[in-house]
Image (tube, grey):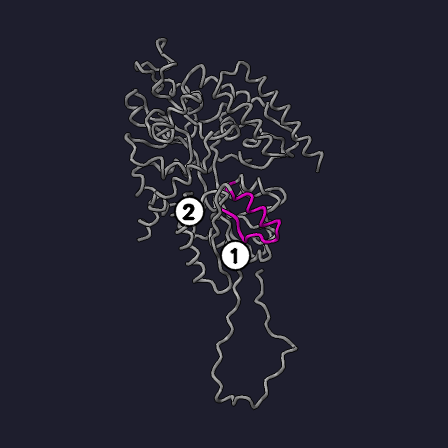
């Protein structure tokens, strides 16, 4: 399935253009004195004639910010980060920052080499929840810093704060979020004579059964028959009603509110729960959506969707596309149709889950001057700076106090829409998160991806329950092996 980071790299050029149009304890300095230095003779130079010597400048603590695990490597982003560094350095006498840009495909190897070599950076980011989870043991606990100065986190969205809180430690302050919701093609709805999907989060009638019915009405073959018609030709589809292919198994299944939400484990992460009733309901729903009801494209159809415009939405072949705000800067450019935003539907349980992505910076616990890193982290996420930083990286600022200003920037870029649909999605984010840690996360995710999620897009699964039972057995074995070694 599609990797969001690739799309983010493309999106940032346009987003930074928006920014330009809108904008018109720490280490002590070294003690250079020595008791072995002889005193200068008193009569060498008359004190009245001696020139005034400038006071020795304090040595700044250097905080390198390692960029490359996520977004931030686009040329325009590099320039913008240099501007951020200049602004920080000109207003701080004790700390100097530098954004160190590393190619994404080299970033993991380079970061681990620096840390194992005893030269860790001062901050790492921006990185998502997957970065928090994938390098969990490397990150410093910032909760003692928060407690020591009674740092006020109340301006951050509460759900954003929770993303970085683990039982053992808190590993970051919220920077930016990428809420998810439905982008819909208004022209497709008008042509079908259908009401637009709601943006009202209190509308309990808007659920995945309703989305299914609506999607089938919007799915058309080359003769104009919709997927409800007995004459519908599933081999010649020209428009699909719904797409959510730019995610993974854990991300897709969050909408059905399974135990553990985005992390299919027990609370202690020792028991796999891939065979839960909710996972079984969700995989059956997806399997039928592709192969029985035909309102979602299979792997071949996805190629057609993406070929038209580089994404499933822009070519006008998907009436509804479920995605995140990171899609907007690149995906909503010069569309040949009118569009708007709709709320994520309720689950079969009457609950609502809207997965999110989130980025921040992390402090390596092996960095010597973590107090300085903490000061930089506070600056990057401060109310007066967070909009500028988020415009560089394409995220929705995690501070509530700047929402009005940021909404004005979105309206200037994207036009007249109900942006509350985006902000309200935050209240329903997936917690635990679909990118959060679980034992041997890469191996477990491989089973979920290769054995289930990728497979359902390439062939009709005759027994989805049995497939999940087999996967659960595999993943339980992975968990057991992991915990046996601890």
Is label 2 in a helix, a strand or a loop? helix
Which contiguous range is marked in magenta?
Answer: 106-128
Q: In the picture provided, is 226 more to the left or to the right than 479?
A: left
Which picture quadrant has residue 416? top left
- Classify residue 395 by image quadrant: top left
* Of residues 249 and 213, the one drawn nearer to the viewer in this rendering: 249
Does the magenta run of residues contain 334?
no
Residue 210 shows in this picture: no
Q: Which residue is mark 2?
A: 390
Q: Nearer the viewer, residue 431 or 328?
A: 328
Q: Is residue 124 magenta?
A: yes
Callout 1 crowding tier (Cα within 10 Å): few <14, some 14–19, many ≥20: many
Q: Which mark is in front, 2 or 1? A: 1
In this orientation, which residue lies closer to the viewer: 135 or 384?
135
Is residue 206 placed above or below 329 in the rendered structure? Answer: above
Please provide percent x and percent y for residue 64.
51, 54
Q: How many angstroms separate mark 2 from mark 1 (CA)?
A: 20 Å
Percent x, y of residue 57: 50, 70
Residue at the image position 63 percent from the left and 44 percent from the top: 168
Q: Residues within 10 Å of mark 2 (few under 14, many from 20)?
A: many
**Earlier sequence position, callout 2 versus callout 1:** 1
The label number, if any, that marks residue 429 in the structure image = none
- Report the residue at 48% width, 42% height from top: 104
Which residue occupies 36% across, 44% down?
13
Report whether residue 169 is seen.
Answer: yes
- The residue under label 1 is 63
Q: Secondary structure at mark 1?
A: strand
Q: Position of residue 420 (x, y in %)?
A: 38, 38
């Amino acid at each position: 399935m599609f990797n969001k980071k690739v799309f983010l790299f493309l999106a940032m050029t346009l987003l930074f253009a928006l920014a330009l149009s809108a904008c018109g304890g720490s280490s002590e300095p070294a003690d250079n004195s020595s008791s072995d230095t002889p005193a200068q003779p008193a009569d060498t130079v008359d004190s009245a004639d001696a020139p005034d010597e400038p006071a020795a400048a304090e040595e700044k603590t250097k905080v390198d910010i390692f960029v490359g695990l996520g977004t931030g490597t686009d040329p325009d982003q590099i320039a913008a980060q240099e501007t951020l560094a200049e602004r920080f350095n000109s207003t701080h006498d004790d700390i100097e920052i530098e954004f160190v840009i590393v190619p994404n495909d080299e970033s993991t190897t380079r970061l681990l080499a620096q840390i194992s070599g005893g030269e860790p950076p001062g901050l790492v980011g921006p990185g998502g929840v997957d970065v928090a989870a994938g390098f969990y043991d490397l990150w410093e606990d910032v909760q003692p810093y928060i407690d020591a100065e009674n740092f006020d986190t109340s301006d951050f969205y509460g759900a954003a704060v929770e993303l970085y809180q683990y039982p053992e430690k808190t590993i970051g302050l919220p920077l930016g979020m990428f809420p998810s919701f439905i982008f819909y093609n208004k022209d497709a709805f008008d042509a079908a004579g259908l009401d637009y999907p709601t943006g009202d989060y209190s509308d309990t009638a808007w659920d995945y059964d309703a989305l299914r019915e609506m999607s089938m009405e919007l799915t058309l073959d080359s003769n104009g028959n919709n997927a409800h018609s007995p004459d519908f030709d599933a081999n010649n589809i020209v428009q699909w009603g719904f797409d959510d292919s730019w995610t993974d198994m854990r991300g897709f299944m969050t909408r059905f509110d399974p135990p553990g939400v985005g992390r299919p484990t027990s609370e202690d992460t020792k028991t796999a729960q891939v065979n839960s009733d909710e996972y079984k309901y969700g995989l059956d729903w997806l399997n039928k959506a592709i192969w029985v009801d035909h309102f979602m494209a299979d792997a071949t159809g996805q190629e057609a969707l993406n070929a038209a415009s580089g994404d499933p939405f822009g070519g006008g072949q998907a009436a509804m596309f479920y995605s995140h705000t990171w899609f907007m800067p690149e995906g909503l450019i010069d569309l040949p149709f009118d569009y708007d935003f709709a709320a994520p539907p309720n689950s079969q349980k009457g609950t609502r889950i809207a997965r999110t992505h989130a980025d921040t910076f992390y402090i390596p616990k092996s960095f010597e001057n973590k107090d300085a890193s903490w000061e930089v982290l506070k600056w990057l996420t401060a109310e007066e700076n967070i909009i500028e930083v988020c415009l560089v990286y394409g995220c929705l600022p995690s501070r509530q106090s700047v929402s009005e200003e940021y909404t004005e920037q979105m309206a200037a870029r994207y036009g007249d829409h109900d942006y509350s649909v985006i902000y309200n999605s935050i209240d329903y984010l997936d917690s635990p998160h679909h990118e959060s840690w679980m034992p041997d996360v890469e191996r477990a995710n491989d089973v979920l991806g290769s054995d289930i999620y990728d497979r359902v897009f390439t062939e009709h699964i005759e027994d989805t329950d049995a497939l999940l039972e087999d996967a659960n057995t595999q993943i339980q074995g992975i968990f057991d092996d992991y915990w046996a070694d601890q």
